[in-house]
Image (cartoon, rainbow, N blue to C red):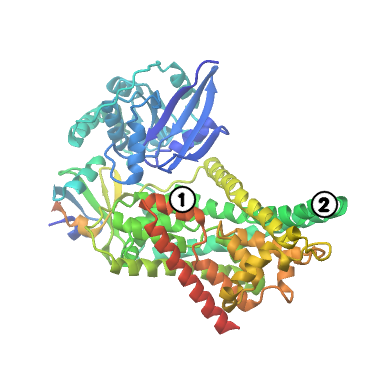
Amino acid sequence: MNLADLSKGKSAVIAAIDEQSLAERLQEFGIFSGSLIRLLGTAPSGCPLMLEAEGTQLGLRKEQAALIKISPLD
Amino acid sequence: MTKNRRFALAGNPNSGKSTLFNELTGLHQKTGNLPGVTIEKKSGRFSYKNQSYFIEDIPGVYSLNARSADEMVATSLLLDNTAEAPEFYVFVADATHLRKSLFLLLQMQEAGCRLILTLNMHDLAEKRGLQIDQAALEEELGIPVIPISASKKRGIEPLKEAIFNYPKSDVQTKVPVKSKPDQLFKRIDSILNRCQKWEAGKVYKRSSEKWDRLLLHPFWGYVFFFIILFLLFQAVFFLADYPNQWIEQFFIITGDWFQDIMPGGPLRDLLVNGVLPGLSGVLMFLPQIAILFFFLIVLEDSGYMVRATLLMDKVMRKAGLNGRSVIPMISGVACAIPAILATRTISQPRDRLITMFVLPFISCSARLPVFVLLVSLILPDQRFLGIFNYQGLALSALYLTGFLAAFGTAWLLNRGMKKQNQDLFLMEIPEYRLPHWPVVLRQIGNRCKSFVSEAGKVILGVSVILWALSNYGPSDFTGTHQGETTSLEESFAGIGGKAIEPLIRPLGYDWKIGIAILSSFAAREVFVGSISTLYHLENPEDQSSILEILGKPGGISGATAVSLLLFYLFALQCASTLVVMKRETGGWKWPIIQFSFMGIMAYLSALAAYQILS
């Protein structure tokens, strides 16, 4: 499952980030594998996504969100 | 007084650096451009206990790993190893988001920067139930820590005292950062564990979320976006109307006064028909420009611009642009030059080139004077359905056309150019914040000042040259002069205007408009000054306002006015834009293509409009 599949308002734990430059950029905000991430909402047609993780809110495009593997919380 | 000490302000974006900068320097600040790299550079000075300080404000970044052009400028200043480098850095951290701030701080510390840490918005953090142990933090980091609230002017004296007591050092060695982000964050988390405590039972929920539910709503979000843009244009017209009239009246009265008290001759003529109309042409538009910048600065500082970027990303990508193109596009409404510089945040070269190419289609404040004059000529200053000002509506339509031309061109370029990999699009969404009004006012003041001094010099110079070219002709030198003075038609300007008349006749322009167009290739707003100088010269006795003169027979007809509006909407009549484009694209190729493309489009649409309407 990846971040693009997460439904609005739900949280998940980041399992892996498949793209190096994306992982580096997220690390600057203190977001790593194991961080809790929540989908706040999306712009119309589902892109970009608005996310919250480690106290930071971020906007991210859907195709990049698809590179972030997550394990959902039950 | 001893030698100046130099230090710089560093920190993340939105940490309140500009507010602190404003608080420290007050009136003693200036905004300039760094040579060669042209990004806005702010510097200022203050003195405390007989010691004077020189401060630089470095653009906010999240880390020392720069990716886009603007980040590179900031990190090169942070890692400055030269003798010009600041002696130390005052790091402005947002106390409510300490974790993120500490990352850059630790990187800078490892790189060898000498630091003072200020915890800005300290009061807000406390209100939210967050307690920061200042002494423990000082011990962990080994640097002075000062809690402040820049917007409430709290903690400024202790900060000045800490700056005063900061040990002097001439040694400046900066080294590359080796620690990995996960190592740094491990350390940050252990520091915060010790130094930061949440008050029991207090859970802070971002108030921004409530607003975002509305402002980022899939439907209402767009409605608000367009309402904001619409209000902006209406305000530019409505609110600026009164100060504009005062300024115009002032110049009419001053002109009459000089006409009465000065003896007739070339000097009075130069002043009354050359300098004064030129000056009034510059100052008339100050109210509009101030209102426009007020809106742009408030949108930016409140955090709304980022939301607009998110909302528009999908739409912009359809046109081959990028969500990050939104801020340059909106800034383009003020001026294409800062807008072109704002494209430096777009890390993808192709997207950046397309954005820069289409930016000059967006109607800038230099076109506004031309639009205002021509629109006032063809439409009444009345309201439609009692709410919407006709002139305001026409202005909105012009701006919309400019945007559409920009999008259309971007779409064409996008199809014609080779595709590249996707840009990494990741933006922090800051919390909404009420703008700090003194900072807003100071910024507006700075922009207006640079408009008057930069555009003003050009406009005034062109007005005076135009006056000379319109008052003297070849006959003054060959001795074949007939009568007292040279008529406008026999002057150098008249001859030049007549020479291009065959080319512009099909657009509905006579030789006088031809002169005005030629003169406005230096800068568009010169048109208004030129037109008023030229028409005043033709009827020197007529002291009515330029609008009244142009409305009379022999002035500018409706069809000609529409044709001119389209010409000015599309043509790239701005030498400064071309120069900046050359520098940013690294050659004359793109500016030349841009200039020709926009010129042809301007000519053809003006031609079509005049032929249909007349």
Q: Position of residue A20 (x, y in %)?
A: 16, 47
In-front residue for pair B337/B284: B337
In-front residue for pair B377/B96: B377
- Look at the image and tell me in which quarter the C terminus of chain B lies: bottom right
Q: Disc 2 marks which residue?
A: B258
Residue B109 in view of the camera: yes
Q: Position of residue B601 (x, y in %)?
A: 46, 71
**Could you tell me which secondary element the residue under label 1 belongs to?**
helix
The residue type indicated by label 2 comes to Phe
Q: Relative to residue B192, is residue B279 drawn left or right?
A: right
Q: Residue at (25%, 52%) from the top-left corner?
A: B424
Q: Disc 1 marks which residue?
A: B338
Q: Residue at (61%, 68%) from the top-left corner?
A: B514
Vertical position of residue B191 compared to residue A41: above or below: above
Q: Position of residue B585 (x, y in %)?
A: 36, 53
Instruction: Determine the image quadrant of residue B559.
Output: bottom right
The residue type indicated by label 1 comes to Pro
Vertical position of residue B600 compared to residue A70: above or below: below
